Image: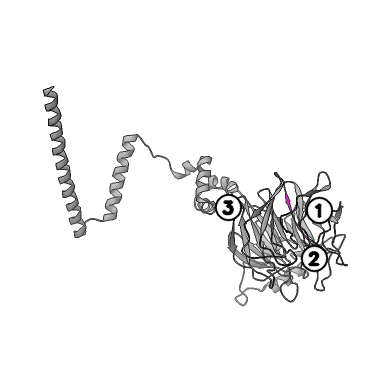
């Protein structure tokens, strides 16, 4: 027992001696580092970096950790990529996709899950003046983002999406309707003027079929409803305005290009068969390659419940069963294989009702009403849900928004827009593999 006690005391004394020597070494090392720093021979940050590397290497050796993987091999595991994407967000993942060819496939695969698309709301009327402001909704994040304004203020305008770009056409621009057109590129984040329509119209509706933008009905300068339809070939239109050239610098003006192109027989806008009825403020949507136009106002200012559709061949309009309600200034969009028509006005009564068309059954189905009455409302569908924005309740313009879930059959509120808007245009740009899809959802 005495031997064991003496052995423990000897070890304790040795440990105490080592502690004193260690403390002395620390003092000497600290003094040496201060001398080197003051003399300019040592960089403090680089010293800490090297110290960290040595400590980390020692920890790896103790625990058998190997780091022979690079970032592209890590992100090749889709659950890992998805987790990183949820933390970093769609904007960061889109930047990674564009910056790295090795990471691009993995980042592109999850973009549709991170952000199925955005809804853009353009122009409108806030109660006193027409708006040129634009904002977009991220349905996954549930927030609005203000975007660069349009070049013109427009109310009672319409919009469609072709190849991921939003085309905004016509509308009431102040003292009179306009026929001007402009296009927004979400990637470039900028607007560009496009060839104008064949005639000025406001309160029209738009739809994209066969890669071409169709503008249907609306009102002319005399406030008379129209049955005419015209369509834009975006390829021809883009060739006329891109690349942009400066007038007087060896280039040609847009008007000159329009004249030359028209003379060559390749005008960007062309007339297609007229609808069977005159329709001011109709609602339009595209479903299964067919362009549907519903309701509107006739020559006697009476709201319509009739509907018709134009097929991919654009030969003739086909009549459809009438809607359950008469509506002018309603909005339409396609979701989950159905065409939804929401709100509108019946005389002086603003509507909250909604219905949808089932193309397989060939009939209209009533839906639960919206939470608010909305005429001259905007709508678009993304991520399998219908989104409705703004409108007028008859007394004031609304800034609120709501969405309908076809699965649950219920309406739920969305974050309010940054401005009140009536007579705005809405369009959805969908994401597929990190690219904007050529699918169009419109108002």
Q: Which residues are magenta?
A: 323-336
Q: Is residue 246 found left or right of 408 in the rendered image?
A: left
Disc 2 is placed on an element classified as loop
Q: Quadrant of the N terminus?
A: top left
Residue that label 1 marks? 313
Question: Disc 3, disc 2: CB below 8 Å?
Answer: no
Q: Residue furthest top?
A: 1
What is the quadrant of residue 253 in the picture?
bottom right
x and y percentages locating residue 227 in the rendered image: 84, 64
What is the quadrant of residue 57 in the picture?
top left
Q: Is residue 248 found left or right of 374 in the rendered image?
A: left
Q: Is residue 331 magenta?
A: yes
Residue closer to the observer: 134 or 350: 350
Residue that label 2 marks? 218
Indicate whether 80 appears above or below 159: above
Question: Disc 3, disc 1: CB below 8 Å?
Answer: no
Indicate whether 57 appears above or below 341: above
Residue 344 at least partly seen: yes
Residue that label 3 marks? 141
Residue closer to the observer: 192 or 242: 192
What is the magenta segment's predominant secondary structure?
loop
Seen at 14% across and 42% down, the residue is: 21
x and y percentages locating residue 173 in the rendered image: 71, 72
Mark 1 Cα-neighbour bin, 10 Å: few <14, some 14–19, many ≥20: few
């Amino acid at each position: 027992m005495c031997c064991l006690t003496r052995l423990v005391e000897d070890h304790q004394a040795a440990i105490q001696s080592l502690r004193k020597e260690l403390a002395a070494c620390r003092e000497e090392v600290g003094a040496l580092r201060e001398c080197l720093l003051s003399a300019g021979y040592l960089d403090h940050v680089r010293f800490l970096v090297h110290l960290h590397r040595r400590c980390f290497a020692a920890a790896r050796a103790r625990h058998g950790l190997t780091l022979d993987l690079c970032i592209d091999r890590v992100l090749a595991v889709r659950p890992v990529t998805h987790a990183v994407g949820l933390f970093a967000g769609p904007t960061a993942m889109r930047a990674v996709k564009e910056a790295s060819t090795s990471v691009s496939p993995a980042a592109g695969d999850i973009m549709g899950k991170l952000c199925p698309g955005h809804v853009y709301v353009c122009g409108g009327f806030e109660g006193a003046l027409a708006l040129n402001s634009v904002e977009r909704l991220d349905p996954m994040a549930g927030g609005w983002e203000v975007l660069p304004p349009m070049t013109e203020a427009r109310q009672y305008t319409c919009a469609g999406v072709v190849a991921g770009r939003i085309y905004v056409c016509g509308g009431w621009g102040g003292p009179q309707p306009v026929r001007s057109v402009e296009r927004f590129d979400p990637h470039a984040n900028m607007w560009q003027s496009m060839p104008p329509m064949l005639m000025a119209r406001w309160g029209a509706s738009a739809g994209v079929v066969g890669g071409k933008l169709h503008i249907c009905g609306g009102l002319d300068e005399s406030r008379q409803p129209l049955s005419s339809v015209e369509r834009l070939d975006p390829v021809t239109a883009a060739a006329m305005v891109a690349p942009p050239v400066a007038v007087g610098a060896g280039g040609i003006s847009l008007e000159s290009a329009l004249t030359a192109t028209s003379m060559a027989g390749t005008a960007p806008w062309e007339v297609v068969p007229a609808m069977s009825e005159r329709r001011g403020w109709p609602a339009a949507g595209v479903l299964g390659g067919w362009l549907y136009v519903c309701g509107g106002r006739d020559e006697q200012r009476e709201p319509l419940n009739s509907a018709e559709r134009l097929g991919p061949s654009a030969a003739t309009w086909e009549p459809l069963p009438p809607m359950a309600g008469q509506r002018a200034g309603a909005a339409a969009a396609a979701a989950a294989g159905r065409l939804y028509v929401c709100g509108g006005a019946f005389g002086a009564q603003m509507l909250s009702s909604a219905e949808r068309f089932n193309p397989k059954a060939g009939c209209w189905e009533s839906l639960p009403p919206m939470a608010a009455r909305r005429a001259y409302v905007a709508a678009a569908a993304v991520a399998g849900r219908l989104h409705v924005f703004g409108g007028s309740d008859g007394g004031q313009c609304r800034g609120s928004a709501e969405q309908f879930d076809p699965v649950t059959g219920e309406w739920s509120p969305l974050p309010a827009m940054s401005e009140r808007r009536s007579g705005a245009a809405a369009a959805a740009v969908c994401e597929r593999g990190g690219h904007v899809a050529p699918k169009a959802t419109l108002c």
